[in-house]
Structure formats: C-alpha cells, structure tokens
Image: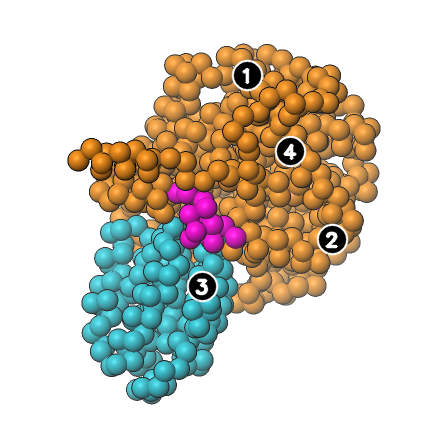
Amino acid sequence: MSTEVTKKREEDKLLNLKTQSGFEPKSVYGPEDVKGMDYKRDLGDPGEYPYTRGRFRDGYRNKLWLKHTAFGMENIEKSVDWLKWLLEAGMGGIRFTTDSCNQLGSDMDHPLVKDTLGCGGPPYCSQRDFERQLEGISLVGLGIDFPCATAAWNNILCYCSLMNLAEKRGMNIAEMRGSCNGDPLHAEAIDSTAPHPLDVTFKMVIDLIEFSSKNTPLWHPLVPCGYDMRESGIDTVQEVAFILAERIAYIEAAMARGVPFDKIRAPLQFSGEIDFFETICKMRAARRMWARIAREKYGATNPQTLRPNCSINCAGSSMMAQQPIFNAIRLTGELIAGVLGGAGSLEMKGFDEPLGLPSQDAEVINLGIAQIVTHEMNVPLVTDPLGGSYYVEWLTNKIEEEALKLMKQIEDMGGFKAAVEKGWAQAEVKKAALKRQSELNNKELIKVGVNAFEHLAKDEIPVRLYYYDNPEKNAAQLLAEFKAFKASRNMAKVREGLLALKAAATRKENLIPHIMRALKVDATYGEVMGTIRIASGYTWDAYDMVQVPDFMK
Amino acid sequence: MTSNKTSEKRPIRVVLGRLGVDKHSRAALVVCKALRDAGMEVIYLGYGLLPESIVNTAVQEGSDVIALSSHCNYHRMLFPKVMQLLKEKGREDICVVAGGIIPPRDKEFLESIGITGSMGPGTPTDEIVKHIKDRVDAARLGHAGAARKV
C-alpha cells in the first residue's frame, strides 16, 4: 500500500518545463538576468513613458477595468431582457453578438443563413433591428463594442446604425464611446475565406477611421486584433508582432488619407490565454514597444496614442468542453493575469463557451470572479505589483526581443498588408494550427481533463446550460418578420439611398455618411454590402446565390 | 442504388466541410491532415456550404464519408437535411460523421438519424481516424444498420 502512495507521489510532478509559447525558463531568475536594464528608459513608473508598467500611476484606484460581455439570445426580445439584466448586475460594457447573417454581411433570407437564424445570437440586418436591441437602454456612459474582427462590414454597419440612433435620441455623436474591431487583414490571415474582398473591406475600415477621427473623437474605430489568429494557434510572440504590425498597416493607410497620427484612437487588444505569466508580460512588452514606435517613428505627443487602452478578451479556445466547470477556474486565472498586466477592459467568456450560448450562470460566475478578485483577493490594489520581479522583467524583455525580430521580418516584406497579400501570414497561421494540435497529441500542451488527468472529467459535475426550444420555429419566425419588414418599406427612398451610396463607392469617396443615410431609409445590411460590392466590380453576393434585386436595376 | 463500393481495399475518400457560415477552421484543418496522414483521400470544401453542395460533391466524387464540422450550433438544423438528401438520392451507404462543438444531448439525437462521432475539441486525432475507418469498414461489408451501432 505504501509503495503505491509513494509511486503516486512520484508521479505528481511538472509534466513539462515550457511555457505555452515554448519559452523554457530556468528555475530561478536573479539580478544577472535583468542586467543592463535602466528603470527610466525601460520601465518608468506606471503612467510614465514607455508605459511598461501601465497607463496610469493610480491604476485601478482611478477606475476598475471595464467588465465586458457578449450578449445575445436567439431573438431580439429575449436579448434586450437579457441586456437589462446584465447592466443591472454590473456589466459596464457590452458586445453585440454576430449571428450568421452578420458574419456574412447578408440579409436574413440568404440561402446560407436562413435556416440557422438565431443560433449565434439575434440576427439583425436593418436600422430598425439594431434600434430594437437597444430599446429602453440608455446610451450614456455605456461602453459598446461592435464585433467581430473577421466581419469588419458588420462593425461598420453597426457603427452607422448607432450614430443614427444617437442622433435620433438627440445626443451629440462626438460624445459617443465604444469600439469597432473590424480587422480585414486579420480575417484574411485565418483560413476562413473572408466573403468580401480585402480591397473593399480595408477601404471601409480606413473610411471609418477617417470619419471617426473628425466626428466621433472618443470612439475607437480600430482595434487591431490578434484574437482569432491566436485561437487558430499562433503563439504569444507572433500575437504581439502581428498586432503591432497590423496597427502600423492601418494607421499608415489612414495617415496617407490625411488623418493625423495623434487622432487615430486604437486600443491594444490581446487574447487572454491560459499561460499566466505570458499574458502579463506580453501586455507590458507591447505597451513599451508601441510607445517607442509611436514616439520615435511617428512623433506622437498625444498620451492617448502613446499609451493606448489595453484590453483582454479571454480565449475561447482555452475553454474545454470536458468538465465545463473547470473553465471557471481557467477564467479566474485569465482574469487575474489580465489585471496584473494592467487591462483597462476585460471580456470574459462563459464557462460554457464550448457548449453553447452563454447562460445566466456563466455571467453570474464571471461577475463573481471579478468581484472576489477585486474585493477579497485585493489584486488591483497596487499598480503593476509584479514590476521588478526578475522573471517578469526577463520574460517581458524576451517577448519584446522575439517580437521585434518578427516585426522586422514583416517590415522587410513590405508590412503586414503585403505579408497577407503574399500569403505569408496565412501560412504562419496554418503552421501554428497544426503545431498546436501536435503539441496536444504529444502532451507538450496540457489540457486538464482532456489529454491529462482524464479521470477528473469522467463524471461531469452538473451545470445548467442555456438551451432554447424549437430553434427551427424561431428561425422561421425571424425570417417571416424580416420578409414582412422588407415588403413594408418605401422602396423609392431605399433605391435613392442605395444609388447615392453606389455613386459614392464608384467615386471612391468616404462611404460612412452614405451608409448612414441608406440605413436611415431602411436599406438592409445585405443591400448596403451588395451595393458596395457591385460598385467595386464584384457580384452582389459573395457566393453568387443572391442576384441584384430588381429595384436596383 | 448505385454505389462505388467494392470489396477491394481502396483508400477511404472523405468530403469534409462546414455548412453555413461557420468560420472556425482550425479543427477542420487539423482533421484533414490527420486523415491524409492516415492514408485517406480528403476533399476539403471549406465553409459556406449548403447541404446540397456537400452531398452532391460526395456523390460525384465517389466518397465513402461526409464529415461535417460544426461550431455554431448549426448541427440541429442543418445536419438532418444532409441525411434527407442522401436518402432522396438513394445514397444512404455514404457514412456521415460529425465533429466540433456538439453538446452531449445533441450527440444522441444525431446518432438517432445516423450521424456518428460528434467528437469535440481535445479528441486525439487517432480516435477520429479509427472511428471513420470502423464506420467505412462496416459500410463496405454492407451492414447498413451498422451506422447506429458503431
């Protein structure tokens, strides 16, 4: 009996000695590992250039991080009730979900989406649908995030709809706060066969940056995103390098249009992956890297552009379907790492992310985690409390060193846009996806309950998942309502609005004001995208399953 | 009913894709490679597929297997259409397997209509390969009911 216990004790040890991205740290770090560092040059106090230690001296004493969540049920009515509950419960920031038609930039009756409406949240493809999602919700002080990075068109359509709504409610759009994270370069880099051509979507994003810099100066029109690429398997070094290189690509394109560098507001957004120290250190490294690029390369003087907001989006792929309650533990770790890294806003996934739409239990758990970490564990009390740790400073330096090498490689290719056009970024993402799987197969990457300690997932601890009845009936009803709406419109006005948009697109003007006007006269999201496509020389529909409508001929 | 099945040991041919607008591609990429490494022929159709397209391709290409990857909860609504189309074309001999984000209670429903597997993130790829091989071996031996037993 005692031999068995001894054997078990011997087997209870570290399964691997590498971090998630393959760093192989020593067992101990000391002064020799940070020799040559200069406090003022390389760290600075929080709130001082180069902002390694954070954006503000008082850190979270000023303001706790914005608690963000995605909200979206199977239809708009349920979603609005749900949103009211979330705001009451303490969420400060909301992210709209993207159902299939929003992913595609099509209408609800498109053959590829009409049978699955509501599976990914409420579908919305008109000004009217958009407004219904915010009925009875005050826009004042609400942090709104439009997703998703791989559907830049949806971001932009939502922005236009929101500004229309704000004007309707008598608000000054110059005071609107929120962000659009449409990132077509990132979308192309993933093997997702983006439905709309890069030249069209890239221009739309630059249009948004230009419009926003003049009309909605508090809005973030750009959040260069590594999230989906990270989900696909790239590591921390690639994530930092790609995010910063993308940033440069978009910013330089906007500057070529005459937008001053200091007027381009774009946060740094990272994936909140499971490796604790990598998350903390990549945020510190990226803040320093960006501050130096902004000042030395672009002469930035605006603190907003030198030390942009840093946000974390917890990694969906870090959540496992086996023994789902364990994901609450993973989320706790990811939150603490994000807070220690200085995140200004943090979106947590539901613990049930791998199993369906987020349940109410998932939101309660996430809010509970945030409040316990804050008020019981006292984690946010001191700004950058790990600053000065030999390991943390070493790892921050190491991530920066490797990411700078990769950024040089991208620069030599002509920048991130060129790297995507050449297919290089896509190849890197594919390689990373296969590498991650092989690491899981070989147990170089451990997932508890999945490829190690499987006995802990044998009996699933009961959880309450969100299910809704009769998805077919829900989809059919949404479709019927949409068709009725389309038939009820003043088609002369719709046609006029879309033709004006088409003319502007043909003349390569900034499309944002024209999209806003078209949406105000009830053009649908699919019709707006179709119009922009045909003006740019493409088919009305990305899959050629829907033809140019008669009223547009 | 026409069938390309013979008793010879020819490589298993799989058509793999994602119905509807499901941009989660990593799993499909990884599974394609695993199946090819195991000696299977894989036709990867990507995403943005209608049930008709994947079924027509499978029939035209003489495939043994249709592998459906789903991460957006589409399986309840779209997968039964695949089975219905196969039935209409008299090609119920083509094995249909699924994978991705499929909750346990939906796995039972899919099995009841003849779609097996429903393996999720973290499944070792050799388990997926074995499952497909077992299904195809049983189908080639002509056991139509084997779909529900494997």
Q: Nearer the viewer, mark 2 or mark 3?
A: 3
Q: Earlier in the sequence, mark 1 or mark 4?
A: 1
Q: Which chain is cyan?
A: B
Q: Which residue is label 3 attached to?
A: B34
Residue A259 visible, this angle: yes
Q: Residue at x 49, y 68 (%)?
A: B44
Helix, strand or loop at label 1? It is loop
Given residues A428 and A205, the one toward you in this image is A428
Q: Nearer the viewer, mark 3 or mark 4?
A: 4
Q: Which residue is label 1 attached to?
A: A385
Q: Are marks 2 and 3 on the same chain?
A: no
Q: Which chain is orange?
A: A
Q: Residue at x 41, y 36 (%)?
A: A14
Q: Nearer the viewer, mark 2 or mark 1?
A: 1
- The answer for how far apart the CA atoms under marks 3 and 4 are is 34 Å
Helix, strand or loop at label 3? It is helix
Q: Which residue is label 2 attached to?
A: A418
- The answer for how far apart the CA atoms under marks 3 and 1 are is 45 Å
- The answer for how far apart the CA atoms under marks 1 and 4 are is 19 Å
Identify the disc placed on residue A398: 4
The C terminus of chain A sits in image quarter: bottom right
What amino acid is found at the position of numbered circle 4 in the picture?
Answer: Lys
